[in-house]
Image: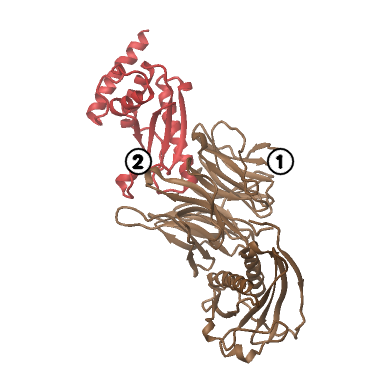
Amino acid sequence: MDLKKILIIFIFYIFSSDCKSEVRIDITEGNVNPIPIAILDFQNNSLEMNSLGKKISGVIRNNLERTGLFTNLRKETFITEKVNFNRKPDFSDWRVTTAQVLIHGRIIELDNKKISLEFRLWDVFQEKQMVAQQLQTNKNNWRRIAHVISDIIYSRITGESGYFDTRIVYISESGLKTKRKKRLAIMDQDGANHKFLTDGSYLALTPRFSPASQLVAYLSYFGRVPRIFLLDLETGKQKVLGDFPGMTFSPRFSPNGERLVMSLAREGNTDLYEMNLKSMNLSRLTKFKGIDTAPSYSPDGKDIVFESDRSGRQQIYTMNLKSKKIKRISFGKGKYATPVWSPRGDLIAFTKFLNGEFYIGVMYKDGKGERVVYKAYLVEGPTWAPNGRVLAFYSQNKTKKNITNPKIKVIDLTGRNLRELITPSDASDPAWSGLLP
Amino acid sequence: MKKNVLLLVLGLFLVASCETTSGVGDGTGAQGYTGDGSRSSLQDYLINEVGDRVYFETDKHNINSSSAFKLETQANWIKSTPGFTIILEGHCDERGTREYNLALGERRANSVKEFLVSLGVDASRIMTVSYGKERPAAEGSTSESWSENRRVVTVIGE
């Protein structure tokens, strides 16, 4: 993948109009009725560019539709499929289609390698231009440009930052339960550009993306010793994270990517440690007879949230890294595990086990306002999209004497819009990247 | 010397009890190995004659009395058969989160290690590894399968 190769050139508001209330979605409310949008294929006179334009528009449509906030109008309902890029659209043509938003654009071949894309986003009812932008990139980078445009559209209409120009690292699974093959794999958030990162000759588990770089930390059984490895996605190189007596696992990067918090199990006791990734200095965070694991940083990097069975069963705790003061925040029935702090800072997602069922839920950072987002026979390991509005996790359902194979699911915080991520094989332990640089 | 004899007698007694309670061990566990000392022959003997695994209750890591009998047989055999190391593999059932199970598997493996060491097995011959819920012994998702999967398995080291 070509990173850092998208140039957003300029914004031209040639069709400005007075500020009336424009089309807007409040995504915290949980939109019952997705808003109808018309996305035209990006145009060009050459066949090759025209077909590339079609593909780009297709990716954008798919991204927006999967949010559950938008519904794409079918081409057959359009009065015209071509809109002159330099003129205001005839809005009456679009109002009859019920479209509230119109997106159209053109694609230009700059040279053998480079393309330029220009697009406009219109509020059909206000007859107002909401976005007009030009972007340049390499031809083979067309998917990323489609994601960047999707983010611009999503962000302009919802007021939230987008999450389409991101990737998901996860564990690809195959084979019998007793001899399960588990490989580290990566894909774009829409499932495209799938790639395996390990060969499956050893177990790979619980990958985590650095929010600030192209580093992935994961648990590897390479050499039959379970330890945390760091994999650099740009160079493909990996190394073991320090050499400790005992097993290191459950890694999580700090928001700036400079530190890593993890569990170290030794002599029957699992405690939390923090490692400075520059100096490789290790500091011990907890010292308690019991299991302290699944730590996750707050967005400012000053606190962590983690699970511990110090009370007798798994519950969620927060710790201030400076004062080392620990506070229990979960008090509900059942066992609480794998807390993950939202990138927005407001919520903590978690896994709960109660009366034979697993739940994905969210609570405020003081433990109040607990709310279930998803429930299944086995569901665990939530990960946040970088805008803190969408969660991914993996789940399995019960069959008569067994359970279904694990699949990654994506859900918005209202719990209304659930989608399965299509992967080449079974999939678990998803971890969302930040927005790509 | 006297103490050793006493331990051996105690060991034989426990093996005998073990036979009636779980059917594992043939009463000669401590002396009966006549193999060539290869890893596979040791492993076979461990599985078929000594008993290579003990089980745990949900979320627990304590050694119950039936496990104690089995581990005493194991300890006697290991002590009387020099020249190999063992790996204790800690496992859990699938009804738990991945990270917690990794920690719990380590905790179980360690409690077996401590028990074997308390019976006189040299700690330097023992390694532990946790597989959490990643390597179940039984495929199913029933309470029978889960009980089979909450285990520590003793494996001959390489």
Q: CA distance from mark 2 to mark 1?
A: 41 Å
Q: Nearer the viewer, residue A431 or B2?
A: A431
Name the residue at 58% across, 41% down.
A229
Q: Chain of mark 1?
A: A
Q: Is residue B85 visible?
A: yes
Residue linked to disc 1: A278
Q: Residues within 10 Å of mark 2 (few under 14, many from 20)?
A: many
| Residue B103 falls left or right of residue A167 | left
**Label tally:** 2
What color was chain B assigned in the picture? red
Same chain? Circles 2 and 1: no
Quarter of the image that includes the C terminus of chain A: bottom right
Identify residue type, mark 1. Answer: Lys
Q: Residues within 10 Å of mark 1 (few under 14, many from 20)?
A: few
Name the residue at 32% across, 31% down.
B65
- Image coords of residue A119 (percent x, y): 68, 76
Image position of A95 with respect to B23: above or below: below
- Marker disc for residue B137: 2
- Image coords of residue B131 (percent x, y): 45, 39
| Residue A327 falls left or right of residue B78 | right
For mark 1, give the secondary structure: loop
- Image coords of residue B140 (percent x, y): 32, 48
Identify residue type, mark 2. Answer: Ala
